[in-house]
Image (cartoon, rainbow, N blue to C red):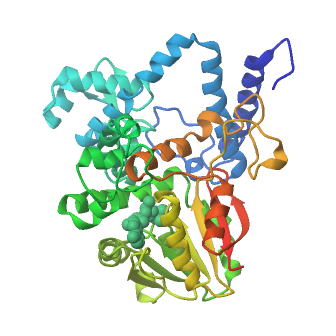
Amino acid sequence: MVSNPVHGQISALAALISDATKIVEAHFSASSKPLVPSLEDASEHPVDQELDSELRNAIQIIEGACAQLSATVARPSHTIVNKLMGFYEPACLGIVLTFKIPDILEEKPAGMHISEIAKKTGLEERKIGRILRLLATKHVFTEVSENVFANNRLSIQLLSDNHISSLGGHFTEECIRSTCFLAEVLGDKEWGPSYSAAQTAFNKWSKQDGTMFAFIENTPEGRKLGARFGTGMMGWGTACQGHDVVHEFPWEELGDGATVCDLGGGVGNITLQLAKTYPTLQLKLQDLPETIKRAENQVWPEKCPEAIQEKRIVFKSIDFFKETPIAGCNVYFLKNIIHDWPADDCIKILSNVRKVMEPHSRILLHEYILQDACRVPDEQTAFKQAPAPLLPNYGAGRIRQYNLDLNMMTMLNSEERGLPDFIRLGAAAGLRFVKLWDLGETGVVEFQLP
Ligand SMILES: C[S@@+](CC[C@H](N)C(=O)[O-])C[C@H]1O[C@@H](n2cnc3c(N)ncnc32)[C@H](O)[C@@H]1O
């Protein structure tokens, strides 16, 4: 904790913000477009794609310290009531996605009056104005003059050709609706203590007996949602900079012709990027049959036809609970798979991989590695803790992993895990923990045969 009795926490947090801001400004100044864009600027900035760890850390400090400073100085009743009413923000985001308002606003970059938005959407004019005003107050859209709204730096992320719009549909429809049942499920005598993937708030809302993935795979309604979910996962990868792993893991050191199996790889989110960045890798994409069909027939012919022509990619469907993946690969890469399942199921998946591993094989689990919100001695943590008095896990700066943890509880009865949990799961499947690759937001846990 801060020991300075004069300035206390407020000054210490303000100093963290001030120092981190200088780092961010320096990165923008050094870029090809050397200006920090205003929120009104409805275009991408080259720095938005930067993967630099110093920049990411500075931004996490700013986000965390600003939220902690506000929570420290504001009246507690004010802050807590604002938190209680926070659900209107995703509700409004869901509405603008449903009616494709960001796309409509693209027709008039200088701003469109709500009467025109109403005509194009069929919505009541003043009501849509109120929804857009709440969002503009949260920095999504700009109200350029009374009742005239324009896209801005944040709302362009919701355009329908951006994969984040599909992710938004998933969160603001099936996830929000399921979450409304979470308290009821937690209090249920049988379902509350259960870790079955089919006894969840999602099951209560959807009235489905099987898991969310069985619903997606086996029903026509589910397949539609599944297609959107698959696309949404690519948006998720962008938001979390999940493609860090493409640049921060030394894939080139695996050698020419090394084989990488992306197990549960969806339609090929990371594999597509590996195919483009490392043309000497031999890639295998494995997932459930419907997803593999979509990958092979739609996504790859459009996004990376060269990998198909050059026979650098193999598509093979799998049920990773019942079957083993393609044998003898150098790398079995599982991104956001283990977090989908309760421990026993994870051990089954990892054991099936272990059966086909050879001494040169390794498993890479790419996940959030949860940190506690309390400070511990540095030598007891695998992650670098944030500077005090900021919460050691960066608070709001790294909130997404805790949101995702609750999303997993709601939809699949699964969880985000800490490093000791991953090591235990690996050991139970007969695997040896090798190292944690700290990618700043996410991490990669590496295992080999004992
Ligand atoms: C959260 S998504 C992760 C997708 C991808 N790894 C990524 O990060 O973009 C989980 C994936 O597991 C797949 N999956 C679920 N159950 C499966 C099973 N029994 N066998 C194989 N894949 C499965 C889903 O189809 C989905 O693509």
Quadrant where ligand 1 appears: bottom left
* Residue 97 sits in quarter: top left
- 233 and 431: which one is in front? 431
Residue closest to the far front: 189
- With respect to residue 366, does 372 lie above or below? above
Residue 349 at x, y = what percent? 50, 72
- 383 and 422: which one is in front? 422
Residue 40 at x, y = what percent? 45, 32
At 28% from the left edge and 45% from the top edge, which residue is drawn?
Answer: 204
* Residue 290 sits in quarter: bottom left
Q: Is residue 308 visible?
A: yes
Residue 243 at x, y = what percent? 56, 61
Name the side, left or right, on which 151 lies relative to 271. left
- 253 and 430: which one is in front? 430
- With respect to residue 125, does 247 lie above or below? below
Residue 133 at x, y = what percent? 34, 22
Q: Quadrant of the N terminus?
A: top right
